[in-house]
Image: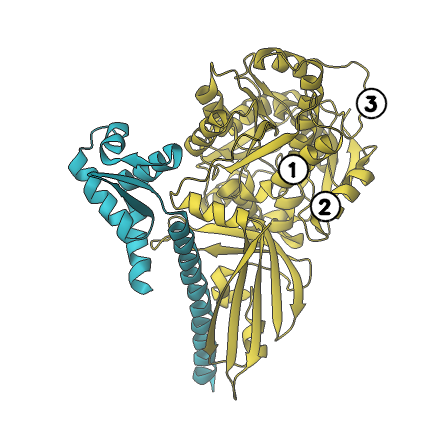
Amino acid sequence: MEQNETLAFDALSDRVRRRILAALGEHGELSVGEIAGRIDAVGRTTVSSHLRVLRTSGLVRERRDGRNRFYSLDTDGAVRDAFVFLQSILRQGITDAAAAAGESSGGVQETG
Amino acid sequence: MDTTTVAVEQTVALAPEALFALFGAGRAAGWLFGARCDDVHVGAPVSLRLPLDRDGRQDVEVLGRLARVVPGVALDIEHTQPWRGRIGLRLAPAGAGRTRVRLRAEVPTGGLEWLLHRRGIPLPEPPDDGSLRLGAITNASGPGAVYSLSAELMAELAVAEINADGGIAGSPVRLVTADDGTDARQAAAEAVRMARLGCHAVFVNSTSASFEAVRRALAGRDVLVVHSVLNEGGGVSPTAVRFGERPRAQLEALVGPTMATTGSRRWFLVGEDYVWSHGVHAAARHVIARAGGRVVGESLTPLGTADFARVIERITASGSELVLSSLIGADEVAFERQSEAAGLRETVRTVSLVLEESTLAHIGERAGQGLRTALAYFQDGPLAGNDDLVRRYRSAYGAWAPAITALSETIYESIHRYARVRHLDAAGGAASHGRALMRRRTGAADVIGTRDLVAPTLYVAEAVGGRLRVVGEAP
């Protein structure tokens, strides 16, 4: 889970990847060439490598039709990612509680 | 609406009662996302900071109220920002001096969509169902989230009432909402999406910077843009109109009377460095001079400022007796809390232009005491029809829903007025609807649902015991 979390974080940290997601959101399913055509100054090879990252982190789905490959948003994957993300935030909240407890009991030891 | 629950659990080396006592208080306020809650009791305002990225630049505030408090055992937060949901905390003894802490977040579909959107995932586009679409851009995150707590709820209430009444010219209305994060570029992007989805009008319950960005982004698209919160005026066109209080009228209602009651003349102006406060300060210099006062200092800080120590030092050093604040949202909360903590209330009287019920709630009862403002609507105000409005709102959203404010009541009124205009002129374009919206009915009574939004009647209110008490109507 930690691994996937990191992957999704990285997948979304890149501007080109976010633009690919936006294009897929707007048009549904697109080929690599169509995606490259909608994003200025980025070639097919670059788009392909970004798509690979998005696919590995579960945000994009691939469909093969003969020699062509088409890409679309993996909504289930994105939702899963959002919940994993939220869970990691909540876990941090509880870690805060542990830290507060540590400080507090540490204070007691000092004065005691 | 579907709700999903996310939960985590951990054991902590402190007894439940002791751990509970640390919540929202004092130096250990780091516990549970830096919770700020002055007084832990049911109904108390609470804010948390969720870290949305690793370096803390994208922290987002969760703003809500305590809906349940069982000391040492349970705490529930019902929140409206950045999405509507509930966060539950459960503490159970786990051996001597240890507590099992369980933290649970209930996330409805809207919350999930907010999270996905913030993470760069495009939202699904609703299929055309023959409804007439209207857009509402509010601040669910960013510095403006504090004053925007009830904006989306009030926009939804207006649409629900219009639909219960048969829709607009026979079509049901569907509201498309978006959070601009109190950021003008995001507002423009959301407005373009709304236009693509076929929204006929976009109501901007956000900053003047966001309104201007939306106006530019939608120019020439036959989409009406309505700024539905108080603003400094200007920047209108046939397809972009602005409703709500104007600083000039607010200042006329506040400056002279405050000088008369305090016998003070020396003003310090505290604002944000963008078009809103620039407009306020220009008007203030004029109104203050005419009332026989003097401006002895001014500060303009960037929107999103959290530390006002330097500004407060300058106010003290200037020998000012009166402060005019046009700070908004989280900035206003920080400034007023820090002013009170620095002892400024003993020497200085403050009036504030964007001080509605939600902002005051987060400033807190003690730091807010004695602040004055002038707005067209107060939840405890005297307007005819208000009791009914509050009842409808509470029955739709529950007892812990945030207060109706001048800002959220204005988007409610704006949507109703647009529906009436469009009902009579279904075939008209945005410009014709815009002109009709700005037409004033002379001699109309100040009644909920048909308020004068172009030059609203103002009421002066003072913060007493954490509430805004209306002390008079502006002349």
Taking A50 as reference, is B21 left or right? right
Residue B439 lies, in percent from the top left, at: 70, 13
Query: How far apart are labels 1 and 2 at the CA level?
Result: 10 Å
**Mark 1 and mark 2 residues within 8 Å of each other at the beta carbon:** yes
Chain under label 1? B
**Mark 1 and mark 3 residues within 8 Å of each other at the beta carbon:** no
Q: Nearer the viewer, residue B160 or A109?
A: B160
Query: How far apart are labels 3 and 2 at the CA level?
Result: 27 Å
Chain under label 3? B
Q: Give the SS element for disc 1.
A: helix
Q: Earlier in the sequence, mark 3 or mark 2?
A: 2
Q: Give the SS element for disc 2.
A: helix
Q: Give the colour of chain A.
A: cyan
**Dot 3: few (<14), some (14–19), or many (≥20) neighbours within 10 Å?**
few
**Mark sitting on residue B396:** 2
**Mark sitting on residue B445:** 3
The amino acid type, in three-letter code, at marker 1 is Glu
- Examine the rendering and report whether any part of residue B206 can be seen: yes
Q: Which residue is mark 1?
A: B156
Chain under label 2? B
